[in-house]
Amino acid sequence: MGGAKTMATLKNARWPAFAVAIAVAPALGGSDYMLHVLVLIGLYVILAESLNIVVGFTGQFSLGHAGFWAVGSYVSALLLIRLGLSFWTATLISMAAGYLMGIVLGLPAMRLKGDYLCIVTLGFGEIVRVFATNLEVTRGPMGLPGIPVPEIAGFSFDSEKSMYYLSWACALATIYVAAKMRHSRFGRALMSVRDDELAAVSLGVNMTYYKVQAFGLGGMFAALAGALYASWATFISPDVFQFSDSANIFCMMILGGLGTIAGPVLGAFLLAGLPEVLRQFAEFRLIILGLLMIVLMIYRPGGILGSYDTAGVSVKARRRKTNKGAKI
Amino acid sequence: MSLSINEVSKVFGGVAALSDVSFSVEPGSIFGLIGPNGAGKTTLFNIIAGVFKPTKGSILMNGRHLENEPNYLRIDRSIARTFQNIRLFPNLTVLQNIVVGMHNKLRCTMIEAILRSARWRAEESAAKLRAMELLDTFGLANRRDAIAKSLPYGEQRILEITRALVTDSGVLLLDEPAAGLNNVESARLVDFIRMIRDKMGRTILLVEHDMNVVMKVCERLVVLDHGVKIAEGEPREIQKDKQVIGAYLGRKFADEACC
């Protein structure tokens, strides 16, 4: 009993512990380069976690997530440069734009499944990039330089350290929302649609609504990552948002554990962090990364954290025989 | 809770799967829909459950037309169903499966869940309590945290029916509930169905192949053959009906058996 209790306490403490670790990490020293990589990982956590709402929770394959990222970046950047709005207002508007874009993509997508849905979402990502390349307002392939950094009450987020805190605050908020969503009426409806559409509908779940909402929410959080990215990099161009990024985000989610909360976080650390660690191996690093991916998929097809299954209840919690603390 | 089916026809391409079938299900009865393979039972069942729209005719629930309503609104009209080849949410726990069944009764939005409002906490714990109550009644309480796909077949069947019950629908549609069950399990199923009607006051409409189960549990039967209703009555009458025996065994047997 004591052991089980300790396990439960440890399990409950793992996210606060993670947040504390993120908060103190810069104090342990580390170069601007390391902080730079960590900001990037934070943005990828937001992207992978938001894609997880669409794919992991709702079971709709989407290979165009970089499209939402681009929408968020461009909307925010244009509002900052052309209209001189504050970063915070611009971010909120770009999130609304990401949400609407998700709804627009979700409407045709709700009639499609599997491979066909993949192709439509892949097409969406490409369309966004082509628009950004050809529109005058986005300055085409020349991109948008000089995007102002976020500011609040005279404090300017111009250092890597300040951006680190901002991006990770947003990443932790995204993780929190995803985790709480899963144990709500809304989240259970998404998972029921993923597991069996016909059964979900027979229980009164409006499948169309939830599929479209999943795309909307996924798009909204990806746009948040986009807005942060634009103000952090201060320059964006269509080249940033390639199909390879969509695929990369997808791999992070799969590698970490599809449908889990911790999985996409771990995946983002591995796939955004490892290329930096392996940088000394130069051109071999992609081969090493690819091999690692193959080995992991053979031995853990559910992802590294796949034992924390998609119901949101850990294997250990299910073995526990107490009558308290069941999660729904 | 009166459900009536009025002159329902369904045409698939050039095939008439159902022609002018009418009957009504008395509130609080256990009603059976039988017929040989290809008789149109499943088609009719799916029309009542809202999966298909009838080509002609109407489905009335307490006088309200249902035939053109979308599928997911059947629960709001007090009609719940199970499936022939059990459709649980395989990756969710037993408890989660039941709570999805309360979807139309829970009111809290996602925002409230994220903010963990008092209303959300109260609603979730009430839902959990209600689910546990039902699981307890049907002997699945100790399986609460098991992943649905890990349950043995018989328990999956019970879980699916429990999930339909938690919706509090007045009418329960059971699609071949005895399919794949052994003799002991089907005997338990008969008791189970009776209990649902007697203790919970639900109306039950079932499609079934297992005549043992049908004759034991149903109080009234409709027999379909080639999309046409050929008989309606109590099981005892149906067993002697010449047309029914003819449909199942061929007309030659019907002549020998009856006259």
Image (spheres, helix red, strand yellow):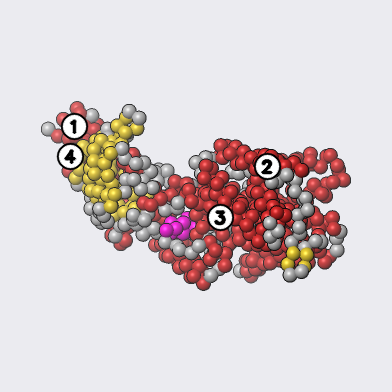
SS at badge 4: helix
Instruction: Work out whether residue A17 or residue B251 is closer to the camera in this orientation and state it.
Output: A17
Q: Please report, as a chain letter, where disc 2 is located.
A: A
Residue at the extreme left of the image, as rendered: B259
Q: Nearer the viewer, mark 3 or mark 2?
A: 2
Extreme residue in the bottom direction: B118
Provide the secondary structure element on which disc 1 rests.
helix
**Magenta region, residue range:** B91-104
Q: Where does residue A109 sit, x and y in percent of width and height?
A: 53, 42
Q: Which residue is mark 1?
A: B254
Q: Say which of marks 2 and 1 sits in front.
A: 2
Between disc 4 and disc 2, the foreground one is 2
| Chain under callout 3 | A
Nearer mark to the viewer, of 4 and 3:
3
Residue topped by disc 3: A311
- Classify mark 3: helix, strand or loop: loop
Q: Is residue A231 magenta?
A: no
- Say few, some or many: other residues with alpha carbon within 10 Å of mark 1 (under 14 / 14 to 19 / 20 or more): some
Task: Name the residue beneath numbered marker 2.
Answer: A135
Q: CA distance from mark 3 to mark 2?
A: 44 Å
Residue ID for mark 4 = B240
Q: Residues within 10 Å of mark 3 (few under 14, many from 20)?
A: many
Residue B143 seen in the figure: no
